[in-house]
Amino acid sequence: MDLIQLHAIGDIAELDKATGSGGALEAAIKAKDEGLVGAIGITGHGHEAPATHLEALRRFDFDTVLTPINYTLSKREDYYRDFLTLAEEIRRKDLGSSRSSPGRCATGRPRNIRTRPGTSRSLSRSGSPLRWRGCSRTRPSPASDGQ
């Protein structure tokens, strides 16, 4: 298996369970040590997800992070601040990353991919920039460089 993810880690209580003695992380590390899995990631939902995933990176050197972002969440200043802090840590550690969001607008049209000005640097091992999916009400504006 290429990747095993600790899923539904959206708050510190869940992170404590997963990273504590006898938790899911121990089993994932054992699987990686035995060659059964190539990478270990973390994912979760909820208003505390970015802060929780940042704490997770302090506890263990995860290979990937999947955390939610969308227009509504980006309007919450605390969430957005934590998300940007997490994104910077992901970039610093050169981790694989993705954001979970629906793939279509309410109109059914595919979403346009936009890059938030000032954050168009690589955030993943694949070299892909931090990209935003959005409809007409996206918080980020299209980048002037055409990305």
Image: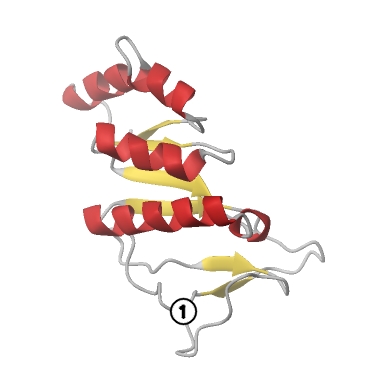
One can see residue 68 in this view: yes
Residue 96 horizontal/vertical position (percent): 33, 52
Q: Is residue 14 left or right of residue 107?
A: left
Pointer 1: residues within 10 angstroms few (<14), some, or many (20+)?
Answer: some
- Between 55 and 129, the residue placed more toward the observer is 55
Amino acid marked by disc 1: Pro
At which x and y percent is residue 73? 62, 53
User: Is residue 38 at least partly visible in the picture?
Assistant: no
Task: Find the residue positioned furthest to the front.
Answer: 78
Instruction: Give the image location of residue 128, x and y in percent.
Output: 37, 67
Q: At x 41% / y 17%, what residue is drawn?
A: 17
Q: Which residue lies under the disc numbered 1?
A: 117
Q: Residue at x 65, y 61 (%)?
A: 71
Q: Residue 114 sits in which quadrant? A: bottom right
Residue plotted at (43% across, 58% down): 84
Q: How many marks on residues?
A: 1
Under tag 1, what secondary structure?
Answer: loop
